Image: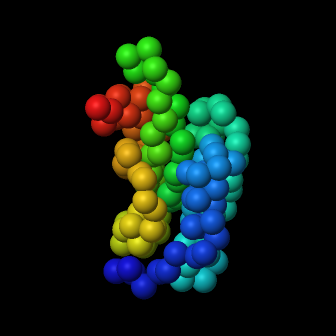
Amino acid sequence: MASGVSVSSECMEAFRSLKLSRKHKYIIFSLSADLKTIVPVKTSAEQDYDKFVGDLPEDECRWAVYDFEFEKDSAKRNKICFISWSPDSAKIKQKMLFASSRDALRRSFDGIAVEIQGTDYSEIAHEAVLFKANSSSR
């Protein structure tokens, strides 16, 4: 908590329902209006990865957890991905606050298999995430 930002209990509840009951496909997190708490701003059961990417704002930072599904060695696999979205067009102050608050959220989640930092959409494209997920598979 280098920035003094705390993680809300709603973040933990949403993550548990993604990880354990697969109620959500992804969760997008942001800072509360007072910049003191990390809160979930969107949960979705939508299976379309492009829809998820479209839910990330072009000029604002976010964090996300995505239950990424792929095939490897003819077997279906899932990896929970933690995505730090900090687009180049975001304000510098916001980027700094999100970067210093990231670890508080990341450490709250057990079971993250892939971590991705994106500054533009090509870095979080399906192919880029697939490459990282395949690389982290045993």
**Residue 77 percent across, percent down from the top left:** 47, 30
In the rendered image, the vertical position of residue 133 relative to residue 82, given as above or below: above
Residue drawn at the location 64% of the way across and 56% of the way down: 17
Residue drawn at the location 35% of the way across and 29% of the way down: 134
The C terminus is located in which quarter?
top left
Residue drawn at the location 45% of the way across and 50% of the way down: 83
**Residue 27 percent across, percent down from the top left:** 61, 53
Residue 9 lies left or right of residue 46; in this view the side is left
Q: How is the image coloured?
A: rainbow
Q: Does the rendering let one see residue 76? A: yes
- How many numbered circles are shown? 0
Residue 108 lies left or right of residue 31; in this view the side is left
In the rendered image, the vertical position of residue 67 relative to residue 88, given as above or below: above
The front one of 51 and 112 is: 112
Q: Does the rendering let one see residue 59? A: no
Residue 102 lies left or right of residue 56; in this view the side is left
Residue drawn at the location 44% of the way across and 14% of the way down: 74
**Residue 20 percent across, percent down from the top left:** 59, 52
**Residue 132 percent across, percent down from the top left:** 34, 34
Residue 47 lies left or right of residue 73; in this view the side is right
Q: Which quadrant of the structure image shows residue 79? A: top left
The N terminus is located in which quarter?
bottom left
